[in-house]
Image: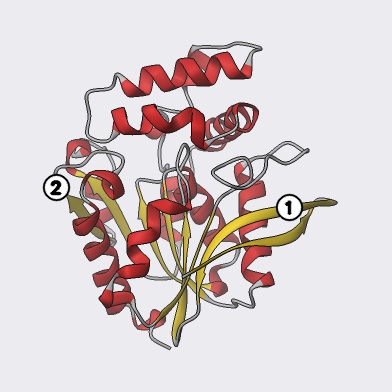
């Protein structure tokens, strides 16, 4: 696993993105992190013996982790363009895609726009319906012109949520995402989710699909629909929205099992 910066050109601006990368003999697995998270959410995947032969990539979105905040506004659509830019720069043509939360939404839009490039898709609680908008709805419920004030308030509210992983997320939120980028991300997520077509978009994808969720979210309204449609649905015990923090062994076992069973990821 090599830590390095990858530079790409996006909308007339040069972006420098912090990455974790490993070459491999099997097709690439590209990991997209969620809001308030970083590429380090996926470091354990690089250590798994079940995934040891795969090429792997995880990177910090602009304004997150070690990647600088861009001068221009950022959105979920931009994350799709940026992801394609990074994989192209590294010479990755076709890949298995894993995305969590905001990264899951970006992965869904990417897989829908470039289905020929996505061999399989593991969606870790990426937005599929308005009920998934806990974070993004905050920009509407707590409006302010002060981005720093908003982010600090959001961090406190997240930290107070009595669900697995939320206190940990809230405690590190201010350090992991730029305040201005945070508001732009959340507005974009909310706007895109409210269009209401994400579940159908996910079900229409032609590649093998997996939906990973924490057991504390057993009440998600669309789980039955996913199962009926033949999506591999993986429930992670002792978890809510952040299974990579609360039960990483179970989460990565579920993802590696799905990936290894997907013929598209073997050649």
Residue bearing mark 1: 15
Q: Position of residue 138 (x, y in %)?
A: 47, 20
9 relative position to 88: left or right: right
Which secondary structure lies at badge 2?
loop
| Above/below status of 140 relative to 221 | above
Q: How dense is the environment of label 2, judged by Cα within 10 Å: few (below 14), some, or many (20 and up)?
A: some
User: For this rendering, which residue is in front, 171 or 255?
Assistant: 171
The reply to whether discs 1 and 2 touch (Cβ–Cβ < 8 Å) is no
User: For this rendering, which residue is in front, 57 or 201?
Assistant: 57
Image point (47%, 53%), residue name: 39
| Above/below status of 138 relative to 225 | above
Q: Position of residue 234 (x, y in %)?
A: 22, 56
41 relative position to 50: left or right: right
Q: Is residue 114 visible?
A: yes
Q: How dense is the environment of label 1, judged by Cα within 10 Å: few (below 14), some, or many (20 and up)?
A: many
Image point (56%, 73%), residue name: 117
Q: Is residue 194 visible?
A: no
Residue bearing mark 2: 237
Extreme left residue here?
Answer: 237
Image point (55%, 30%), residue name: 186
Which secondary structure lies at badge 1?
strand
Image point (58%, 47%), residue name: 66
Q: Quadrant of the C terminus?
A: bottom left
Which of the 4 image quadrants contains residue 91? Answer: bottom right
Q: Position of residue 37 (x, y in %)?
A: 45, 42
């Amino acid at each position: 696993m090599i830590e390095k910066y990858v530079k790409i050109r996006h909308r007339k601006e040069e972006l420098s993105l912090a990455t974790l990368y490993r070459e491999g003999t099997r097709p690439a697995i590209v990991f997209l992190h969620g809001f308030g998270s970083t590429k380090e959410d996926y470091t354990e995947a690089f250590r798994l013996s079940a995934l040891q032969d795969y090429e792997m990539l995880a990177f910090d979105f602009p304004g997150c982790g070690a990647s600088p905040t861009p001068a221009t506004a950022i959105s979920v659509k931009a994350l799709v363009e940026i992801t394609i830019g990074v994989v192209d720069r590294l010479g990755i043509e076709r890949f298995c895609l894993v995305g969590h939360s905001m990264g899951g939404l970006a992965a869904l839009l990417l897989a829908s726009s470039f289905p020929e490039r996505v061999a399989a898709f593991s969606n870790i609680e990426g937005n599929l319906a308005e009920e998934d908008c806990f974070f993004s709805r905050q920009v509407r419920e707590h409006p302010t012109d002060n981005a720093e004030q908003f982010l600090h308030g959001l961090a406190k509210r997240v930290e107070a949520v009595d669900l697995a992983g939320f206190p940990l997320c809230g405690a590190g939120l201010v350090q992991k995402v730029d305040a201005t980028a945070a508001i732009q991300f959340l507005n974009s997520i909310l706007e895109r989710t409210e269009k209401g077509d994400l579940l159908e978009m996910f079900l229409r994808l032609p590649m093998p699909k997996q939906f990973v969720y924490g057991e504390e979210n057993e009440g998600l309204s669309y789980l039955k629909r996913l199962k009926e449609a033949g999506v591999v649905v993986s429930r992670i015990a002792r978890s809510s929205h952040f299974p990579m923090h609360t039960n990483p062994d179970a989460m990565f076992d579920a993802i590696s099992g799905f990936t290894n069973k997907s013929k598209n990821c073997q050649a």
